[in-house]
Amino acid sequence: MEFKRARKPEHVAQRRRTILETACAMLRERSVADISLRELSDRVGLAKSNVLRYFDSREAIFLEVLDEEWGAWLDEVEGALAPASDPVEVATTIATSLHRRRLMCELICGMAGVLERNISVDFARVFKRRATSHTDRLADLVRARVPVLDEPAARHFAKAVLVMTAGLWPHANPADAMAQVMREMGAPPPDEMFRVGLTEGLVTHLAGLVARA
């Protein structure tokens, strides 16, 4: 498919949407690290230089996808959390919802180490404000269900959700050789290890913050 350069604002918005949707589709097939800007451009039907008219870089595209996924995930969490919940229920609900969102887990895993390394200062400011807003929203959702937590503790937990997800996610997607060895050793399926590990980690972390409070 060939595209002419978009000039009207609505055409620019549509072009950006096409690029983001294509990036999402590719992420469902493979990891961020395996997707080059050239491959993404080819899939969209644009030259790399034309894609860069709409986004700073390959990394900026995936951070935009993360921003949208993050907001959608928080909407889901807000609907899933009961008005009055104990810490175990809150942490379990958050872990379960993240486990279902493989795309978001993949992007969180690559956020600090890869995606934030090749963006402009202007875009970094925009993304950091959005990320902080998302973190604050999760902290507010948790604090509303676990009122014993003060604001710093709730924000600490919200940040820990990201750190634990980023740390555990690579183990949910081992290379073929490692997956074979794990099966030979009788280890649980990697995806199940991720779900259990994230749940146990978040439950323990939130319970500790409650006990300290």
Image: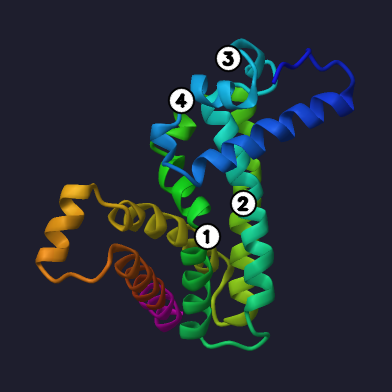
Segment colored magenta: 204-213
Task: Determine whether the residue tagged by mark 2 lies in a helix, strand or loop.
Answer: helix
Name the kind of residue labelled 3 in the image: Lys
Label 1 or label 3, whichever comes before in sequence order: 3
Name the kind of residue labelled 2 in the image: Glu
Which residue is located at x 53 percent, y 79 percent?
Answer: 90
State the residue position of label 4.
36
Residue 102 within the magenta-colored segment of the rendering: no
Residue 72 placed where, x, y %?
67, 57
- Alpha carbon distance from label 1 to label 3: 29 Å
Nearer to me, 121 or 93: 93
Label 2 or label 1, whichever comes before in sequence order: 2
Name the kind of residue labelled 1 in the image: Arg
State the residue position of label 3.
48
Neighbourhood count class around disc 1 (C-alpha, 10 Å): few under 14, some 14–19, many 20 upward = few
State the residue position of label 2.
69
Residue 106, placed above or below residue 92: above
Q: Which mark is residue 101?
A: 1
Task: Determine whether the residue tagged by mark 3 lies in a helix, strand or loop.
Answer: helix
Residue 169, placed above or below residue 145: above
Which residue is located at x 39 percent, y 52 percent?
Answer: 166
Label 4 or label 3, whichever comes before in sequence order: 4
Residue 85 placed where, x, y %?
58, 87
Label 4 or label 2, whichever comes before in sequence order: 4
